[in-house]
Amino acid sequence: MTRSLSSLVLIPVLLAVSGCAVSSGAPAAAIAQPEIAAAYLPLHGRVHLGVDSADGAAVAIAPGIAVTNAHNADLLDPKNVIATRRDYDLLFFRTSKNAAPQTAAPIIGQGVTAYGQGADSELRVAHGTVREIKQCPGCTAPAYFVFAGNAGPGFSGGPVLNGDGRLIGITFGYKDEGHQRLIYAYDMARVRAELSAARPAPAR
């Protein structure tokens, strides 16, 4: 069952064309949370026959396993891909990182911080507030959650943290409503459920 939304824009990778990068103008920063800093993976690749470069983000969620958006596949070595869950725009891949950040569930009204990549591969930071947690019939985990914030291109596949620095989601899309931007992210319970579905159960 598809989880795409009408009028929702999948967060595109940040494109740099002929040396001119598309950027929000956010300042360079560093990830303050050591666990997330150890798990964060900037993604960079060449697209459009190598003419342009593109940037996105990913995060390790278990030793040797990271997650990003499926639409970031061109930024990864196909040999490292474990599985793609296209109904949820999720892609799991092998990484040398052994980080496994602590996770938590999103809570309506809580402040969140999201990380992504900008021009010249600098880290970008966005802040927002959780507005909605979307459930789906028959699902064991929420489909996604929505926060109002200032993320956009380059945040594709990046982590979303709560105020305690715990990983609560993975960004995948946005929608502008008037002067407000709504950012869409997969709850980590959904990410874990999709990883479990993608990996064969251990033999008994």
Image (cartoon, helix red, strand yellow):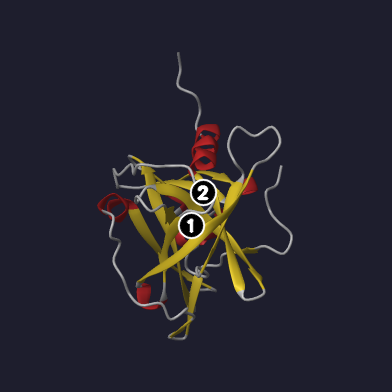
Taking depth in this image into account, of 154 and 129 the one nearest to the observer is: 129
Residue toward you, 191 or 90: 191
Residue 58 position, x and y percent, is 42, 55
The residue nearer to you, when weighing 21 against 129, is 129
Q: Position of residue 149 (x, y in %)?
A: 52, 66
Splitting the image into 4 quarters, where does residue 71 fall?
A: bottom right
What residue did someone put label 2 on?
91
Q: Is 27 placed above or below 161 here?
A: below
Q: Which mark is residue 103?
A: none
Q: Which residue does the image show at 34% across and 55% down from the upper left?
A: 40
Image height of 195 relative to 159, above or below: above
Disc number at residue 157?
1
- Please state the horizontal and vertical placement of residue 1, each as a whole percent of the image: 71, 42
Q: In terms of secondary structure, where does tag 2 sit?
A: strand
Residue at x 43%, y 55% (from the top left corner): 159
Residue that appears at 43% across and 81% down = 25
Amino acid type of disc 2?
Answer: Leu
Q: Position of residue 121 (x, y in %)?
A: 36, 72
Q: Residue furthest left?
A: 34
Which mark sits nearer the N-terminus, 2 or 1? 2
Tell me if 176 is positioned left or right of 195 in this view: right
Q: Nearer the viewer, mark 2 or mark 1?
A: 1
Q: Amino acid at mark 1?
A: Gly
Foreground residue among 13 and 110: 110
Can the viewer see residue 182 in this picture?
yes
Are discs 2 and 1 less than 8 Å apart at CB?
yes
The Cα–Cα distance between marks 2 and 1, rounded to whole angstroms, is 9 Å
